[in-house]
Amino acid sequence: MDLNEYQQLAARTMGPRPPREQLINAVLGLTGESGEVADAFKKHLFHDTPLDRDAMVKELGDCLWYVAALATVLDVPLAEVGERNIEKLRKRYPAGFDPERSRNRTE
């Protein structure tokens, strides 16, 4: 499945809210779901539990849904979001990640 196909399928479950409410839901939902990813990792770090890979994948899927919803509200294909991010990363790290370039970014 490509990103745009995912976005189209995910959009079917967004519900009939006005655009402003869709935007609010997407932004706050992404924040909440990323917090759930962090919480699952915190339990691994500080509660001495094994990292629950399945739970992490499910939470990442929820994050992806909200990213797709936000892209839909902004009327931008999810593939474009990905392409633009890779473009930015290529400019920032042309030879791959470099800690020195990371510390001394100009942007």
Image: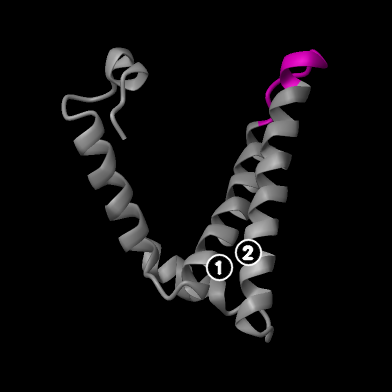
Three-letter residue code for mark 1: Ala
SS of the residue at dot 2? helix
* 3D distance between C-alphas at marks 2 and 1: 6 Å
Which image quarter: residue 47? top right
Mark 2 lies on residue: 26
The image quarter in which residue 53 lies: top right
Q: Is residue 46 magenta?
A: yes
Disc number for residue 69: 1
Q: Residue at x 23, y 28 (%)?
A: 93
Residue at x-position 46% and y-position 75%: 8
Q: Earlier in the sequence, mark 2 or mark 1?
A: 2
Pinpoint residue 13: horizontal percent, then vertical percent: 64, 76
**Residue at the location (64% across, 74% down)?**
22
> Which residue is at the front of the view, 22 or 82?
22
Label 2–label 1 contact, CB within 8 A? yes
Q: Is residue 51 shown in magenta?
A: yes
Farthest residue, direction front: 106
Helix, strand or loop: magenta stretch: loop
> Is residue 38 visible in the rendered structure shown here?
yes
**SS class of the residue under badge 1?**
helix
- Give the farthest residue toward the right: 47
Q: Nearer the viewer, residue 10 or 22?
A: 22
Q: Position of residue 23 (x, y in %)?
A: 61, 70
Q: Quadrant of the N terminus?
A: bottom left
